Image (cartoon, rainbow, N blue to C red):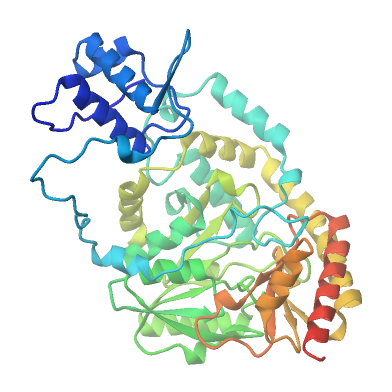
């Protein structure tokens, strides 16, 4: 065990006393935790350049005081319960009392972060009937195929997987993704147009860093994804909410002077509306005329259950005004941290350089495995299977909502994606519903956090169905119905 122990300045005190005080401070500051084994006396003596007898005396002193416990044949450990700090030597006479020193001065960027809510609830324990959104079904992940590809690559890893890689990503994965995006999403890109990133949030951060200066105006869908809002605010931008209706963002309400507009056209988050063909052309024309850039977040477009597949907005762009991004978190596993961004040619160099400064590159092993996973057909087979699985879960969810929540429930966004937006007429306190549901083991999530301006008159909730089993959907919505009935009784409904 390598340790650093500072010997305090205690004039007139022997070295073992100074060492004991240094160890005592390390224990009280938490650098050595209760129950943790300390280095052997010989090892510590060699590490800090003292005689072993000096270390022995310091250990004996701390054992007498109750800070350490010696176990014969095992070693010396920090005591599970520390004694009162009255054992600590008194400050030397005349010494100025210790005062807290001010920390480092924060940058303007750091001060902006203090005002941005980036807290997430994903670390909270899952509830028995959790309609968590944005999370795929872990049970359905093709672990056997992924494991086999991983082993194959690790058995004979090429040298380029063992060192540093290009910030844009491995060529094999960029090629595989370019081919997939071209045929499935109509994206205009070649291998050199795809940059591999650590999920869509990094794509948003890189876009914000390379497109925005403090004070620039960003137009965002209202309601809209708060992770994007946070990235733009951290860059110092002024974020202006723009209304969303049944056809997507209302282009005619985009403010003058907008530098960037952020949209989720294939499945608006969180309402689920789809940007109509007319609005798409209107938005592209607006971007061309105003000189603005569009960031298209295509976060869950792989799953569509009604109508023809929708091409990406980027595929309609003739003027290089669209930055396209997507993620594997909704399709495979969020823990893989694999996403991609397709910037216009003029932005590629800046994105690559910003990526290099941020983290050099995404984990090369995962990139190599995903490239093989796509090339050998596993990815699209998995997608086809998951569309069927999620379609069944969606059908079960809609049926349960109809039966247990009745006509007061309005659902939007059921044509695609892995979540719906549920609005409950007559409910003004969404938090009461969320808390009541949690009390009976049901997890639902208010959509209020996605509104930057005025909240809607009725409570709305984002309800995911991708990570909850079919048999749990019925019981979860039935319990939610009972919570809603109790809410009505309490308010005299």
- At horizontal 32% and vertical 13% (from top left) the residue drawn is 41
Q: Nearer the viewer, residue 373 or 71?
A: 71
- At horizontal 59% and vertical 51% (from top left) the residue drawn is 328
Specify the quadrant that holds the C terminus: bottom right
Residue 24, horizontal then vertical, whole percent:
31, 31
Q: Quadrant of residue 211?
A: bottom left
Left or right, 379 with respect to 220, comes to right
Q: Nearer the viewer, residue 467 or 432?
A: 432
Q: How many marks?
A: 0
Above or below, comparing residue 31 to residue 220 in the picture: above
Q: Quadrant of residue 303?
A: bottom right
- At horizontal 21% and vertical 24% (from top left) the residue drawn is 17
- At horizontal 62% and vertical 47% (from top left) the residue drawn is 333
Q: Nearer the viewer, residue 448 or 253?
A: 448
- Is residue 82 at least partly visible in the picture? yes
Above or below, comparing residue 206 to residue 307 in the picture: above
Left or right, 467 with respect to 298, comes to right
Residue 349, horizontal then vertical, whole percent:
31, 55
Above or below, comparing residue 292 to residue 196 in the picture: below
Residue 345, horizontal then vertical, whole percent:
37, 60
Left or right, 237 with respect to 185, comes to left
Specify the quadrant that holds the N terminus: top left
Residue 3, horizontal then vertical, whole percent:
30, 25
Q: Quadrant of residue 55?
A: top left
């Amino acid at each position: 065990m390598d340790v650093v122990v500072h010997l305090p300045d205690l004039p007139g005190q022997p070295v073992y006393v100074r060492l004991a005080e240094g160890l005592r401070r390390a224990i009280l500051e938490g650098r050595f935790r209760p129950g943790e084994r300390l280095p052997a006396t010989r090892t510590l003596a060699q590490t800090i350049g003292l005689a072993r007898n000096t270390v022995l005396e310091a250990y004996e002193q701390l054992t007498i005081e109750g800070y350490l416990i010696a176990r014969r044949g095992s070693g010396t450990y920090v005591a599970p319960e520390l004694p009162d700090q009255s054992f600590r030597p008194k400050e030397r006479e005349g010494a100025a009392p210790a005062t807290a020193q001010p920390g480092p001065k924060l940058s303007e960027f750091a001060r902006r972060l203090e005002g941005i809510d980036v807290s997430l609830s994903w670390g909270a324990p899952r509830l028995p009937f959790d309609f968590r959104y944005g999370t795929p079904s872990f049970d359905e992940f093709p672990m056997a195929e992924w494991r086999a590809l991983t082993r194959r690559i690790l058995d004979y890893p090429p040298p380029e997987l063992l060192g540093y890689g290009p910030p844009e990503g491995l060529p094999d994965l960029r090629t595989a993704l370019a081919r997939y995006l071209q045929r499935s999403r109509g994206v205009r890109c070649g291998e050199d147009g795809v940059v591999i990133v650590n999920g869509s949030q990094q794509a948003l951060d890189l876009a914000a860093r390379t497109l925005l200066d403090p004070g620039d105006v960003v137009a965002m869908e209202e309601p809209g994804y708060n992770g994007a809002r946070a990235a733009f605010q951290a860059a110092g931008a002024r974020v202006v909410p723009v209304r969303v209706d049944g056809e997507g963002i209302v282009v005619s309400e985009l403010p003058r002077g907008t530098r960037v507009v952020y949209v989720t056209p294939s499945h608006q988050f969180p309402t689920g509306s789809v940007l109509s063909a007319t609005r798409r052309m209107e938005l592209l024309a607006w971007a061309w005329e105003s000189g603005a850039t569009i960031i298209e977040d295509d976060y869950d477009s792989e799953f569509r259950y009604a109508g023809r597949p929708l091409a990406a907005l980027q595929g309609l762009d003739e003027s290089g005004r669209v930055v396209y991004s997507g993620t594997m978190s909704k399709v495979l596993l969020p823990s893989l941290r694999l996403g991609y961004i397709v910037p216009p040619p003029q932005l590629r160099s800046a994105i690559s350089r910003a990526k290099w400064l941020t983290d050099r590159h995404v984990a090369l092993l995962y990139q190599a495995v995903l490239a093989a996973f796509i090339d050998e057909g596993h990815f699209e087979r998995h997608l086809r299977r998951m569309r069927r699985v999620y379609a069944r879960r969606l059908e079960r969810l809609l049926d349960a909502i109809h039966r247990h929540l009745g006509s007061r429930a309005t659902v939007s966004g059921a044509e695609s994606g892995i979540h719906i937006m549920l609005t409950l007429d007559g409910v003004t306190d969404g938090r009461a519903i969320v808390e009541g549901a949690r009390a009976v083991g049901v997890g639902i999530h208010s959509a209020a956090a996605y509104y930057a301006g005025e909240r809607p008159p009725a409570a709305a909730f984002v309800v995911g169905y991708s990570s909850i089993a079919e048999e749990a959907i019925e019981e979860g919505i039935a319990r939610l119905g009972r919570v809603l009935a109790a809410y009505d009784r309490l308010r005299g409904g």
